[in-house]
Every structure is written in C-alpha cells, then in structure tokens.
Amino acid sequence: MKKLVLLVFSIALFYSTSEAQTGKAFYNTSYKTRNSGSFGKSTNLLTFSYGFPNVPLSGYNYRGNDRVGFGPAYAKYEHGIMDEVGIGGQVALSGGRYNYGNNQDERISTFHFAVLGYYHFNKLIPVSKLDVYAGAGLAFRNRAVRYSDNAFSDNTSTNVTPSVKVGARYYVKPHFAFYAEAGYDDMSDVNLGVTFRF
C-alpha cells in the first residue's frame, strides 16, 4: 500500500513539475512568438451546437395547450487570420408551435445570421488542448409569426443587434473538440456542441 501511495505521489509530483516547467518556458517566450497550439493563423473551425433557452419564443411560452419547439440550432465557421485572431460567421434556426385547439395554432420561425471577430487566449494559456476565446460582432434576426386562421394577422420582425460571446473548446483529439459558449446574440444565452478543426 505504501509503495502504491508513493508511486501515485511520485507521478503527481513529476506531472506538476513538468507542467510548471512548461508554463515557465511558455511565459519566458515573447508574446509575439508564443502559441500554445490551440489556435493559429490559417486554422479553420466548423462548429455545430444547440442553444438554451430559445429566446425567440420569449413571450409565447404561456400560450396554448400543446407546445412544441426546437432550437436554436447553430452552425458556425471561423478562419484564423493571425495566431490569436479569427473571423467568422454563424447561422441559427429556431421554431415553435402553439396549438389552441379547434384546429387553431400559432407558428414562430426564426432565422439568425451573425458576423464576428474572435480573440483567442492561446498566447496567454499554455494548454494546447484548451482554446479559450472571446468574440464580438453584429447579428441579424428575422422572426415570423403565422396563424392558422384569420383571427390574428401574421407578422414579421427584423432586428440587427450586437453579438458578444465568450467560450472554450477542449480538444479530445487533434481535430475534434467539445465546445461551450455563453453570451448575447438574441437567440440563446448558452450553447453546447462540437467543433471540427481542419
């Protein structure tokens, strides 16, 4: 038992010492040339995610007896233009249906598009599998509300809003990561998904 405890302690000590040396060497390198490897110039990222809550349905969730909704579902692309800077875009879709009985229902469908710039902290965090970033840009959202009868008028609204994000990816394989993001884009507050790097 003592040998096992000593072995575990030795491995932990070796790992923490090597990590400390790696971090020290990382920070002793000039900012311009350092890079953890989690992001870089010419990196391409394709992300698929699902958001919570479904913000475009806000104000409708109390209506009807039978409610069905999906999304927002996101597809995102980013391209590295510098070792720590990328530009990209995202599209998202969400929808919902509220049934009032007597063959009356209300359908809400939303399309979202945004263009963002990203700063990655790969020059500040010396972990090659962890990509932490912040992003900002402009988002366009179109929401259409349609009714199955003439009791109400269909309507459409279009908004242009700022989009602000913070997020992180953890690479379990060189080209595959799990992903989490939070912020404001008029579609959801948090989204979770996967990223493919190529």
Image (spheres, helix red, strand yellow):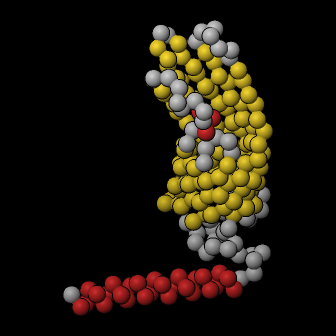
Residue 149 image offset from top left, x and y in percent: 60, 9
Kindly tell me whether residue 132 is visible in this rendering: yes
Single out the residue that lies furthest toward the left.
1
Report the front residue among 108 and 22: 108
* In the rendered image, the vertical position of residue 120 relative to residue 197, given as above or below: below
Q: Quadrant of residue 48?
A: top right
Residue at the spot x=24%, y=91% of the render?
2
Report the front residue among 147 and 180: 147
Answer with left or right where residue 30 lies relative to residue 21: right
* In the rendered image, the vertical position of residue 104 relative to residue 139, given as above or below: above
Residue 98 image offset from top left, x and y in percent: 52, 23
Residue at the spot x=53%, y=82% of the render?
19
Q: Quadrant of residue 125?
A: bottom right
Answer with left or right where residue 107 lies relative to residue 138: left
Answer with left or right where residue 122 lies relative to residue 73: right
* In the rendered image, the vertical position of residue 32 relative to residue 47, given as above or below: below
Residue at the spot x=62%, y=63% of the render?
132
Residue at the spot x=58%, y=30% of the render?
60
Q: Quadrant of residue 61?
A: top right
Residue 158 image offset from top left, x and y in percent: 76, 31
Answer with left or right where residue 39 lies relative to residue 95: right
Kindly tell me whether residue 47 is visible in this rendering: no
Residue 8 image offset from top left, x and y in percent: 33, 84
Q: Quadrant of the N terminus?
A: bottom left
Q: How many marks?
A: 0
